[in-house]
Amino acid sequence: MKVRWPWVPRMAWDLVVEELRRVREQNDRLVEHITRMDRVEHGLGEHPAKVRTFEPMPKEVYEKIREYESPQVRAQVEREAQALHRQGVAWQEILERLEV
């Protein structure tokens, strides 16, 4: 069985399509707002925390740290280098600091 839809003027069709777009946008905004408020109710921030990714330690930095004789000093310098990188310092700058 084939359903025959009635013919409608183009202007009426355009109005319906525009209204559908507007309602979908409004619905998306409301869902986003409800999600944010639900997170706040449960003690979280409005937006999820951004996941930060860090580059692994380059071979040059690793080899420079391994030049130290004491294992304790090597471990301390490695921890400090990782901490500097997490704070946003580039590996190249850390390597330059180690060479001084």
Image (spheres, rainbow, N blue to C red):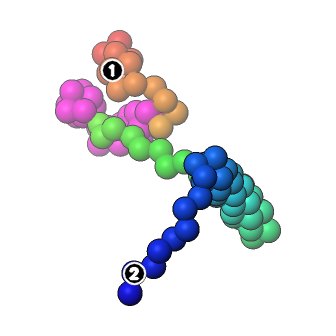
Q: Quadrant of the C terminus?
A: top left
Along the horizontal axis of the image, is 40 left or right of 70?
Answer: right
- Place residue 89 in its image quadrant: top left
Residue highlighted by disc 1: 92
Q: Is residue 46 above or below residue 98?
A: below
Comes first in the chain, label 2 or label 1: 2
Q: What residue is shown at x 49% (from left), y 30% (from top)?
A: 88
Above or below: residue 87 compared with residue 23: above
Q: Nearer the viewer, residue 87 or 18?
A: 18
Q: Residue at x 25, y 32 (%)?
A: 58
Badge 2, how many Cα within 10 Å: few under 14, some, many 20+?
A: few
Magenta stretch in the rendered image: 58-85
- Residue tagged by mark 2? 2
Confirm whether the magenta stretch covers residue 75. yes
Q: Nearer the viewer, residue 16 or 66?
A: 16
Q: Name the residue at the top extreme.
A: 100
Q: Residue 67: where, in percent of width, then height?
A: 22, 29
Amino acid beneath label 1: Gln
Residue 98 seen by the camera: no
